[in-house]
Every structure is written in C-alpha cells, then in structure tokens.
Image (cartoon, helix red, strand yellow):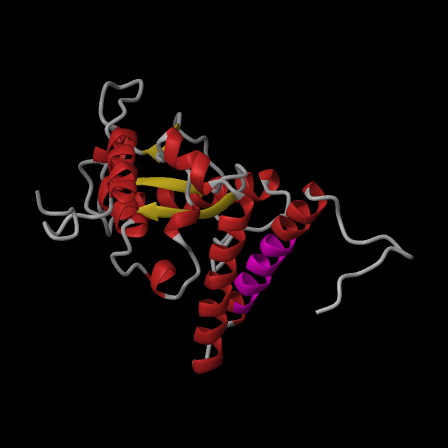
Amino acid sequence: MPSRRGRGLPPEEVAAILRGLKNALDLQDATGQRVGDAKYGVYAFYDYDGEPIYVGQSTERLRTRIRRHLTNQRTDAVAMSVLDPFEVADVEMWPFWGLQGLPRKSDAVKRQLNSAEYVVFQRVLAESSFGAVLNEVPVKPAPLLELPPSIKARIVPEDVYQRRIHPDTRIARRAGTIARLAQVISEREVQRGLRTTLLTQARRLERLAATRLADLGGPPQPGEERTQD
C-alpha cells in the first residue's frame, strides 16, 4: 500500500488534529446549530499550558477563518510567524447568529464584532499569566457588550497531546518560531506591535525553559562542580 506521503495525504498526526478541529467546529451550541457554521463570530486560541495566545474575529464563517489559521493557509499571523499552529491545543468560539443575514460591511456587524473582540481580548489578557497575547495589533477599545455563550474544545487528540506537551519539544518549536519572527523583523520595516509580539514570545520561551530546568533540578548551586566543555 502506498505511504500517506505517496498518496498526497498529511502525516497521520496532522490528519488526527484536522479531525479534532473538524469535530470542534461541528459542535452544536444551545441553538442546535454547528458553531463553525456561524458566519460571524469571535475566537480565541489557547496553548498547551492553557494560556490564551491569540484572539480574532471572522466575517467569513468561523469554520473557514479558524481552519485558515490552523492549516497554514497564509493568514497574516501565520505568514509573519506570529502564530505557530503547532502551539494551539484548544479553541474557544463565540458565534453571533443574530447577525447571520446581514452583509459583512454593515455597521451593525462591524459594531458588534469589534465590541465582542475587544471584550474577549480584555478577558484573555486578564487570564494570561503574562498579561499579553500574540496579536501583533492590540484590539482597539470598543463599547462593551454581553457575549453569547461560547463553545470551547480541545482540537488535539489525547495521544498526540501527550507527545506534543513534552517541554523539550515545545522549547525547540518555540525557539524556531522566535528565530523566524526575528528574521522577518530584521528584513522589513515593521510596526512596534510586531516587536512587542517578539518580546512576548521570548518571555514565553524563557518561562518554559526555566520551568523545564527547575523540573530537572535547577542550575548548579554555588560551589558545585560544573562540567567543562
């Protein structure tokens, strides 16, 4: 039988995550509708520590927008190495069914989505132990509104989750993301927000590396013998 690569299929681990993503987008909310089918909505991504890492809004169906982020289909955040899809373990979605029949450029759609995105952004900042997420452009202040009930789901199957959560794997991956983002910054004229994102990524890497070192017994104490190179 031809290999998955020979048949043009993604690796099994990637395929499993795509199935998990589809299952999450197909979840029904209290209205009985599949949350991914909402034309308008707001979403947030969380990493393997439960840290919020990105917030966005969609006017093209939540299913389409989120899949584009997480399948490397050249969204700005992915293309600029701001967001690494590998880091996303959980997705939370707020569908706005009441806007479904309105054109995307209508004032009502813009007002409600901008307000909802701002409310979610402020909520996840409060949840973040860094007080920051990876959005390169902070969400602009907007009038507050009451959010609809959200659907939050893990998109990574348990066996894949247990492999990817290993800190050494995540440290290596995150360091690579930082290197790519730093290269983008070095080669272009960029806004301050992208440099802020680089700093946030560096802080996240430092936290992960420090936690891993502590788990292994920490650095040598004063007076302890160090191994020479």
> Which image quadrant for residue 122?
top right
- Residue at (48% x, 53% y) in the render: 139
> Which image quadrant for residue 96?
top left
Is residue 205 shown in magenta?
A: yes
Is residue 161 shown in magenta?
A: no
**Start-end of magenta stretch:** 195-206
For residue 180, say whether it is visible: yes
Relative image position of residue 130 (x, y in whole percent): 63, 48
Q: Quadrant of the N terminus?
A: top left
In-image side of 50 versus 153 (left or right): right
Foreground residue, 54 or 169? 169
Relative image position of residue 83 (x, y in whole percent): 42, 55
- Residue at (52% x, 36% y) in the render: 50
For residue 59, say whether it is visible: no
In-image side of 199 versus 16 (left or right): right
Foreground residue, 179 or 42? 179
